[in-house]
Image: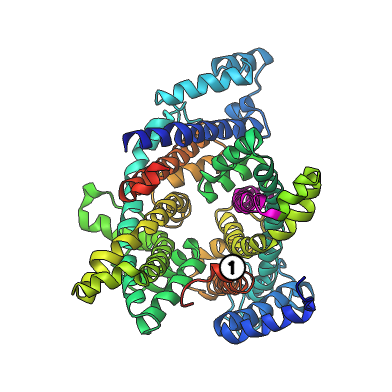
Amino acid sequence: MLSYTLRRIVTVFLPTLLGISVLVFGAMQAIPGDFVDIMIGLGPDVSDEQRDAIARSYGLDAPVPVQYVVWLGDAVRGDLGTSLRTGQPVSREIVNRLPATLELALLATVASLLIAVPAGVLAAVHRNGPIDLIARLGGLLGLSVPNFLLGTLLILFVSLHWPVLPTTGFVPVSDGLLANVRSLVLPAVSLGALLAASITRMTRSALLEELGKEYLTVARAKGLTDRGVVLGHALRNALVPVITVVGIQTGYLLGGTVIVEQLFAIPGIGRLALDAVLQRDYPMVQGTTLFIAGSFVMINLLTDVIYGLVDPRIRRQ
Amino acid sequence: MIAEVPRRSRTLSAVRRAIRRNRAGSAAGLVLLVLVLGAALAPWIAPEDPVTMSPLDRLRPPGDGGLLGGDLFGRDVLSRVLHGARISLITGASSVTVSAIVGTALGVVAGYLGGWVEYVVMRVMDVLFAFPSVLLAILIVAVFEPGFTSIVIAIAIVYTPIFARVVRGSTLTLKHIEYVQAAVASGAPASRVIRHHLLPNITAPILVQLTLSLSGAIILEAALSFLGLGAVPPTPSLGSMLSENRVYMELAPWTVLYPGLTLAVLVFGINLVGDAIRDLIDPRLRTEGS
C-alpha cells in the first residue's frame, strides 16, 4: 500500500502539481499590461528610473525562467508573495479565508453523502417504484440546475419568506454555532446539490449492477435476509465506484465555492480568488488559484489512495 | 460479405424505435426544439430590442406591456431571454466544437503514436483537468480581454482534456484490432490510418461527449457571466441577467425567474437528449433501467 501511494505521488501528484504551477505562473506572464503599471495604478507620474527600481524590487528584471524558479521556491516554503491591494502576505489572507470555505465544503459533502447514498440505495432496491422515480428525477434536476441558479431560487423562495436562514452573510463559529450553521445552510445546499445528484445516480446504478451478481445468490442461499444481502454485501462493493465520484465532485465543489461564496457573500477562498481576478491583484490570483488547484490534486490523490485501500486489485496494477 | 442495408432507412427506424422507447427523452427533445427555434429566430421574433432601455417599463410586471415583464432598466425580459438563450447556445456550441476538434486531434495522435508524444500530451491534459472548471475558465478569462472570443477560448480549453481522454482511450482499443493492424502492415502511413480507419470508428463516443459537454459549457458560460467575467453588458446573457436583477428580485421575481427557468430547461433538455443519443448510438453505455 505504501509503495502504491508513493508511486501515485511521484508519477501523478508531483508532475501535475508542477504543471499547475507552470500554468498559473505562465498565465500571469501572458496577461496584457505591465506589472509595474498595475502596481503604480493611477498614481503620480513615475520616472523610468523609479519604474526600474520597482521592477527590480520585485525581481522582474530577471529572465522569466529565473523568476519562475524563485517564485516556485518561495511558494514551496509557503511564501506566495504580497497582495497588491492589501499589502498583506497572500498566504496569510488564504489562511484567514480558509475556515469559511472548509466549513462550507465539508457541510455540503457530508450532507450530500447522508442524503444521496440512502436515496441511491432505496432507488435501486425499489427499482422503477415511486422512490426510484423521485430519485432519478431529482438526480437529473440536480445535474441540470447550476449552483448559482439554485442559490438564487433558494434566496427567492426560502430565505425571503423564512428569515431563519439568512439571504447573505457569514457568521463565524466564534459568534455561536447555531447562527454559524444557519448562515451556511442555503449555501451548502446550493453547493452540494450537484454532488448529491451524482452520488445518488452512481450509488443507484452501481448497486443495481451488483445486485445482479452471482455471489449475492450464494449469500441469499445461505439464508441471509434481503437487508443483509444489500447492506452487508452488495452495498460494500457498489460504494467503490461511488468513492471516485465523491473524489472528483468534491474537487469541483472547490470550483463551485467561487460562485456560491460570491452569491451568499461568504468570505472564503473562492471569493478571494474572484475578487483578485476582478481587481487584477496578480500575486493573489496566482496564490489562490495555485492553492485551490493544489487542493484539488490533493483530493484526487486521496481518492486514489482510498480506492487502493478498498480495492486491492487497483494497487497491484 | 454482409448484406448491404440502406443506411438511411436503418438510421430512421432506429430513431423511431428510440422515440418509442424513450418517452422522456423525446418530450425533452420537443421542448428543446421549441427553445432552440426561439433562440435561433430571436433577432426576428423577439418583440423588442434586447438592449434598449425604457425607463417607463422598469420592473413592469409580466403581461402588462411585455409578456414576461421588464427588467431593472426597463428592457423587455422576453426579448432578453430569447437572445440570451441564443448566446448560450452559440457560445456553448462553438466552444464545445473547438474542444472536440482540438481534443480529438490530440487524443488520436497521442493514442496512435504513443511514446513521448503520448506522455507529454496526456500530462498537459492532466494538468488542465486538475483545475476545477470554473477556476480554469476564470484564469483564462483574466488573461484575455473580456468578450465572446475569450469566453469561447476559456470554455474550449476547459473541455479539451475530456475529448482528448475519450478519443485516446478509443484509439488505444482500436489500434489493436485486426483491420487497423492490417492497414498498418500493408504500409499505410499514420495519417491515412488515422483518417480512414480510426476517426470514422470513434465518432460515436465523440458525439456522445459533445452533447454531454454542451450542457456543461452552457452552464459555464452562464456562470462566468453571472460572476461578471463573461458577456459584456448590456449583452443579454442568461447568467448576467440573473446577477444584474438580483437586487430587485424580491420586488420583481420575474426578472430572475424567467432567465433561470430558460437556462434550467435548456440544460435539462440537452442532458435528456444527450442520454437518448447515447442510448441510440452506443447501447453498451445504456444506464440500467433508465
Helix, strand or loop at label 1? It is: loop
Q: Is residue A23 visible?
A: yes
| Above-or-below relation of B73 to A30 | below
Q: How is the image coloured?
A: rainbow
Q: Left of B64 or right of it: where is A220?
A: left
Residue depicted at 56% across the width and 17% down the height: A59
Return the x and y of residue B69 as percentages of the image width and height. 61, 78
Q: Which of the two residues, A207 or A96, is positioned nearer the viewer here?
A: A207
| Above-or-below relation of B219 to B161 | below
Q: Left of B201 or right of it: where is A314?
A: left
| Above-or-below relation of B106 to A128 | above
Q: Is B190 contained in the magenta span? A: no
Return the x and y of residue B68 as percentages of the image width and height. 61, 80
Kindly identify which chain the residue marked by label 1 belongs to: B
Name the residue beneath numbered marker 1. Answer: B72
- Quarter holding the C terminus of chain A? top left
Q: Which of the two residues, B270 or B15, is positioned nearer the viewer here?
A: B15
What is the three-letter code of the residue carrying label 1?
Leu
Q: Quadrant of residue A41?
A: top right
Q: For mark 1, does the 10 Å Cα neighbourhood hold few (<14), some (14 to 19), or many (20 or more) residues?
A: many
Q: Which of the two residues, A175 or A47, is positioned nearer the viewer here?
A: A175
Q: Quadrant of residue A240?
A: bottom left
Return the x and y of residue A133 as percentages of the image width and height. 41, 81
Q: Residue furthest front?
A: B1
Q: Is B166 contained in the magenta span? A: yes
Q: Left of A290 or right of it: where is A61?
A: right
Q: Which residues are magenta?
A: B151-178
